[in-house]
């Protein structure tokens, strides 16, 4: 009777195949979840009613109710108002990101995400990127309405596209504040209510409907430090002419600051909650 002796393996770990990390994993996971958000929006197009009808309603009401009293002519007032309404509409659309994330948390969607081998912040980044389609739809619907009413691009197409890109970029940065609200609050209604309390002074406490120099002194002080007011003035300059550089610098500074503060806080709140 013979016995076969198997020599011991010198390094057992060497025989175990370890999965190699794939490059740009967080980017790929975020884009995949952004695609999920886009599919959800396409399958429920009623989610886009606020960004398609709301800007048209605002333009029609403000132009024909206030245009004659403020500017003396509805066409001149349309030229003054529409770039600011574009900024207001896109900024308002960023609120929906926090509401949607809070709804997914309550439904348990993020429990599934937590079990997947993906970056912890990928669901948040994917949701914010997916909601960019809302900004584009809002801009397109407002542009069509403005052109039908007679709005004229004084500076040309390229500066107008630059105004749209600036507005979308600023709204992307601001949306992280509402992502944080979505992570720390327990109900979607509470997220929406709190967000709108913040949004009204940010959007209406500006020179959107009347020139800044006609406002009371205390309100002018607020307008001069309000990032949304700077975005509106920069959009006006890019679309109908006027000063741009100073306002654009403030928009970039505020956008970078908002992103640097609220994005890490939102990711931390998400990790604690999930």
Image (cartoon, rainbow, N blue to C red):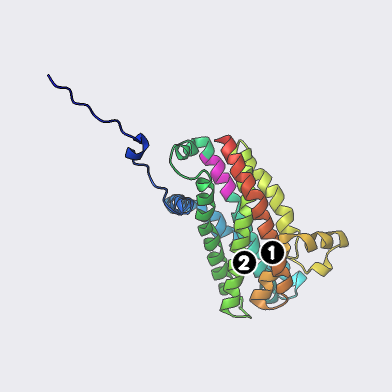
**Is residue 65 visible in the rendered structure shown here?**
no
- Report if the CB atoms under discs 2 and 1 are less than 8 Å apart: yes
Residue receiving disc 2: 166
Where's the C terminus, which quadrant? Answer: top right
Name the mark on residue 15.
none
Q: Position of residue 92 (x, y in %)?
A: 63, 55
Q: Earlier in the sequence, mark 2 or mark 1?
A: 2
Helix, strand or loop at label 2? It is: helix
Residue receiving disc 1: 251
Please give left or right for residue 75 compared with residue 107 in the image.
Answer: right
Residue drawn at point x = 72 percent, y = 69 percent: 247
Residue 234 sits inside the magenta stretch:
no
Residue drawn at point x = 34 percent, y = 41 percent: 17
Q: Quadrant of residue 189?
A: top right
Helix, strand or loop at label 1? It is: helix
Between 4 and 202, which is closer to the camera in this rendering?
4
Q: Position of residue 161 (x, y in %)?
A: 57, 72
Residue positioned most to the right: 217
- The magenta span reads 97-104
Where's the N terminus, which quadrant? Answer: top left
**Is residue 118 visible in the rendered structure shown here?**
yes
Residue positioned most to the left: 1
Between 146 and 4, which is closer to the camera in this rendering?
4
Q: Position of residue 144 (x, y in %)?
A: 54, 70
């Amino acid at each position: 009777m013979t016995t076969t002796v198997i020599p011991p393996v010198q390094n057992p770990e060497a025989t175990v195949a370890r999965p190699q990390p794939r490059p740009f994993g967080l980017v790929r996971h975020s884009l995949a979840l952004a695609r999920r958000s886009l599919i959800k929006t396409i399958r429920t197009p009623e989610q886009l009613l606020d960004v398609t009808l709301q800007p048209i309603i605002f333009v029609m009401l403000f132009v024909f109710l206030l245009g004659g009293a403020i500017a003396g002519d509805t066409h001149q007032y349309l030229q003054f108002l529409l770039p600011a309404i574009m900024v207001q509409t896109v900024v308002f659309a960023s609120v929906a990101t926090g509401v949607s994330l809070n709804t997914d948390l309550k439904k348990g969607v993020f429990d599934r995400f937590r079990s997947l081998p993906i970056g912890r912040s990928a669901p948040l980044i994917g949701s914010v990127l997916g909601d960019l389609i809302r900004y584009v739809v809002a801009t397109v619907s407002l542009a069509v309405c403005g052109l039908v009413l007679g709005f004229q691009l004084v500076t040309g197409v390229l500066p107008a596209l630059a105004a749209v890109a600036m507005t979308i970029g600023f709204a992307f940065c601001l949306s992280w504040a509402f992502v944080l609200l979505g992570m720390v609050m327990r109900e979607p209604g509470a997220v929406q209510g709190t967000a709108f309390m913040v949004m009204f002074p940010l959007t209406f406490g500006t020179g959107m409907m009347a020139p800044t120099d006609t406002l009371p002194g205390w309100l002018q002080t607020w307008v001069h430090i309000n990032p949304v007011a700077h975005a509106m003035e920069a959009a006006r300059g890019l679309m109908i002419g006027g000063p741009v550089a100073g306002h654009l610098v403030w928009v970039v500074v505020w956008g970078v600051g908002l992103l640097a503060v609220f994005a890490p806080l939102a990711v931390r709140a998400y990790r604690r909650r999930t």
